């Protein structure tokens, strides 16, 4: 009896982008929660990266293709979604802390953040925090991408 042929599903990049963004949101929320409670939130960058990559694979249909290589689009999309979500999370963290310290609503704090980021000292702290989170995310993604390349699972 002949073996059934494996069906190769076409990767839907648009849906993959949507999945990466949606799955990165809980990672951003984790970053926010850890930062608010005073923990080192940079480690949550790894979780955000893993979630973005998983979201891309599920929504694009790539997870249906057993043994098929990850596309460059999946990797690039996951990296971008992760970095943008972590940037947004840090922006919300700073806005939240400012709202608590100055008796503002979170939306008022968010509206004045662009003005505060013009101040060199404030901007230095913000960028340092963002780069710390991005560094851990890059380490996490780099390890995963390296393992895919070594196993020959990237297209």
Image (tube, rainbow, N blue to C red):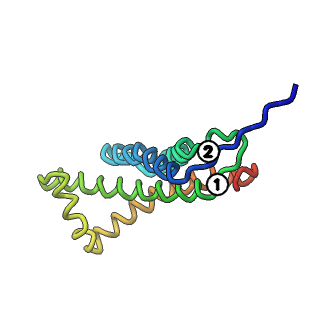
Q: Which residue is at the far top?
A: 1
Is disc 2 surrounded by few (<14), some (14 to 19) or many (20+) residues within 10 Å? many
Q: How many marks?
A: 2
Question: Label 2 to label 1, Cα distance in Å?
Answer: 9 Å
User: Which quadrant holds the C terminus?
Assistant: bottom right
Across and down, in percent, residue 68 comes to 71, 46
Q: Is residue 76 above or below residue 148?
A: below
Task: Describe residue 97's horizontal placement relative to residue 5 as left or right.
Answer: left
Q: Which one is in front, 105 or 33?
A: 105
- Residue sitting at 19 percent across and 58 percent down? 109
Task: Describe residue 70's horizontal placement relative to residue 33 as left or right.
Answer: right
Task: Describe residue 101's horizontal placement relative to residue 21 as left or right.
Answer: left
Q: Are the two marked residues, 2 and 1, in contact with CB atoms closer than 8 angstroms?
A: yes
Across and down, in percent, residue 5 comes to 78, 36
Q: Which residue is at the far right?
A: 1
- Residue sitting at 49 percent across and 49 percent down? 20
Q: Residue 56: which disc?
A: none
SS under mark 2 = helix
Is disc 1 surrounded by few (<14), some (14 to 19) or many (20+) residues within 10 Å? some
SS under mark 1 = loop
The residue that mark 2 highlights is: 62
- Residue sitting at 39 percent across and 43 percent down? 30
User: Which quadrant holds the N terminus?
Assistant: top right
Q: Which residue is at the far left?
A: 103
Q: Residue 71: which disc?
A: 1
């Amino acid at each position: 009896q002949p073996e059934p042929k494996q069906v190769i599903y076409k990767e839907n990049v648009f849906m993959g982008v949507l999945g990466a963004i949606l799955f990165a949101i809980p990672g951003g929320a984790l970053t926010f929660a850890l930062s608010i409670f005073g923990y080192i939130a940079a480690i949550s960058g790894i979780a955000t990266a893993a979630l973005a990559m998983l979201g891309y694979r599920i929504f694009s249909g790539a997870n249906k293709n057993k043994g098929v290589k990850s596309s460059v689009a999946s990797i690039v999309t996951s990296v971008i979604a992760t970095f943008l979500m972590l940037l947004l999370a840090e922006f919300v963290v700073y806005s939240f802390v400012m709202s608590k310290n100055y008796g503002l609503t979170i939306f008022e704090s968010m509206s004045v953040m662009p003005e505060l980021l013009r101040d060199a000292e404030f901007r230095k702290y913000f960028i340092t925090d963002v780069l710390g989170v991005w560094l851990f995310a890059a380490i996490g993604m780099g390890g995963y991408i390296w393992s895919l390349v070594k196993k020959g699972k990237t297209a």
